[in-house]
Image (tube, grey):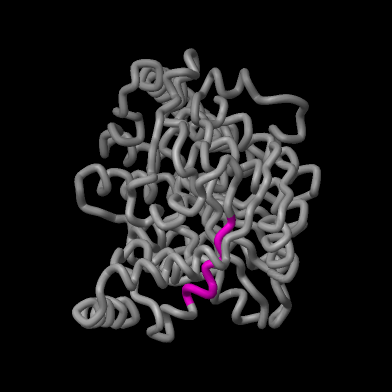
Amino acid sequence: MMKTRFLMLGFFCGLLAPARAQDTTLTRLLRTNAYPLTATGAQLAGTGWDKLRASIAESQLVLVGEDHGMAQIPQFTQAVARVLQPAAFITEIDRYQARTLTRLTAEPGFPTAYLKASPGALSFFSWNEEYELARQLRTQQTQFIGIEQVGIFTPGRFYEQLAGLVKSKPARAYLQQQSTAYQRHDNAQFRSGGQAYSMLGQRQSALDSLETLTRAESPEVRRMVQDYLLSSRIYRNQVKGMGNHQARVNLMKRNLLEALRPLAPQPGQPLPKLLFKFGASHTARALSPWAGITDVGNLALNLADAQDAKSLHLLVMGKQGTQVGGFNPDDPSKNVVPFDLTKEPFIKPFADLATGPGWQVFDLRPARRALLRDKLEVANQLLENIILGYDYIVIIPAATASRG
């Protein structure tokens, strides 16, 4: 209903007011509420950071929405975490990757050998800056919570974990054999730039065998198998063009609610401070700007509302530069791709005002209030959804790819 209302409002008002007036009002609101931010690694300063820090301090749940693969965003998130001091970090990996990340970050250094053997097995945390974020959170005694479906790059490691848990010797031998075969296949895909990953190519007979062999195993093993089967189905349907994004988002919501239950075990007990970091499509207050459905960000807003607390929704975007575009373990230069969003309508109003070498923080709340009170028209639907969905947008003028 809300989306329909704004679409109709934008259409009829567009007949009455010239586009130049729309642009002028939005530009004035953005310029009036723009603040500079200076970033030196994970150290942030300036009036933009002062503004953000005050909002973070008064929030119970803070969500960072990003375009993946930029070194500056996990460094920005480190600064957010130092202010928030979250009890848990909720992110776009699966629960089994989160357990592995917890184990590995207790050890010194970057897990080079682990990732050489299984590229991409930690998803985004396979990159140096993301891993440093995880290490800082570990020192802050922050719990890692992964709510995503089983990672598409992880069958080798996943089957290896299963093999270590099963009691049946035939099941263990089968799982170890499959683990080796899947890892070998996926490593070859990484090195060749292919995308025919094991999880996408598994035959139904292999999935049936996995379920049959583990039917008499522990509840933990059976849960892992069901997680894997559901994830495989979601990936396969996406590849076939059958969508299934809604099923993926619904799964993340269920996983989030399940993971939060131990953090507030008593009825009426408030949730502790929580930090979220996901792709930008997942973290908006209202509808996902890109997918047009309610996502994790909307659930977080409702959880905060239910305990009379605040959720803060931050969008961090690079204006142009480079980002990660692969997981090649041998030649990191093959993973770096350029990008330029300066002409994209959803970011152009911010990019046009962020002309210097420094970062810019835009407080979107005044523009959102104007939009909701029919004082502002926005010609681009995606831009309108961003204003409705986020409290701040942070623009990085020249982003650089995370190091792998």
Residue 167's image quarter? top right
Asked whether residue 257 is in view, the answer is no
At x 35%, y 37%, the residue is 209
The correct choice, above or below, for 355 with respect to 187 in the image is: below
Q: Is residue 93 left or right of residue 110?
A: left
At x 40%, y 30%, the residue is 338
Residue extending farthest top: 330
At x 77%, y 26%, the residue is 108
Query: Which range is magenta?
Result: 361-368
Question: Where residue 259 appears, x then y in whole percent?
Answer: 61, 60
At x 38%, y 84%, the residue is 374
The correct choice, above or below, for 374 with respect to 96 in the image is: below
Quarter of the image with the N terminus is bottom left
Asked whether residue 242 is in view, the answer is yes
Q: Is residue 185 left or right of residue 399?
A: left
Q: Is residue 287 left or right of residue 69?
A: left
